[in-house]
Image: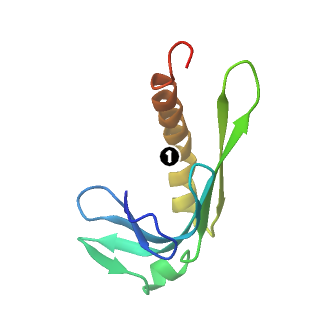
Amino acid sequence: MESDWKVGGKTFFTDGKGAGMVSTIVDNVPNEFISFKHLGMVKDGVEDTSSAEVQQWAGATENYTLKALNGETAKTELIVDMDMNLDEKMKEYFDNAWPKSMQLIKELTEENEPKGEV
């Protein structure tokens, strides 16, 4: 991911080889909420925001909310919601990718939990 983190700025979700998605940030409340609106695809470093393929799902949104939970130890809940018109191929991709992504986020955050009293 490459972003300036500014509302209205461009954000690129790529594979490191110049292929992926180009989006914009609709709203950003640091450490609480961020919303992305997908604009199109990037292939070989070139943005595509107008092809028929892209127009099928352009404008889709992804929202990430961090919600503090009360308890004996500080915990945070990550809530992800998406509003997308997905064809069967993309639905299958997300059905496979999201559980893996959430597991990785869980492992990374648990690995970096503070140890002992602060």
Is residue 15 rendered to the left or right of residue 54? left
Residue 108, percent across and down? 45, 31
- Could you tell me which residue is drawn at 70 percent across and 43 percent down? 67
**For residue 78, above or below residue 106:** below
- Of residues 89 and 55, the one nearer the viewer is 55
Q: In the displayed structure, does residue 76 sit left or right of residue 2?
A: right
Residues packed near mark 1 inside 10 Å, few (<14), some (14 to 19) or many (20 plus): few
Q: What residue is drawn where x is 25% and y is 72%?
A: 45
In the rendered structure, which amino acid carries the disc numbered 1?
Ala
Name the residue nearer the viewer: 72 or 16: 72
Work out which quarter of the rendered image holds the C terminus and state it. Answer: top right
Q: Residue at x 56, y 54 (%)?
A: 30
What scheme was used to colour the molecule?
rainbow
In the rendered image, residue 89, in percent from the top left (x then y), is placed at 51, 60
Q: Secondary structure at mark 1?
A: helix
Q: Nearer the viewer, residue 32 or 41?
A: 32
Image coordinates for residue 114, horizontal then vertical, percent: 50, 21
Badge 1 is on which residue? Answer: 97
The number of callouts visible is: 1
x and y, in percent, of residue 106 in the image? 54, 31
The answer to which quarter of the image holds residue 78 is: top right
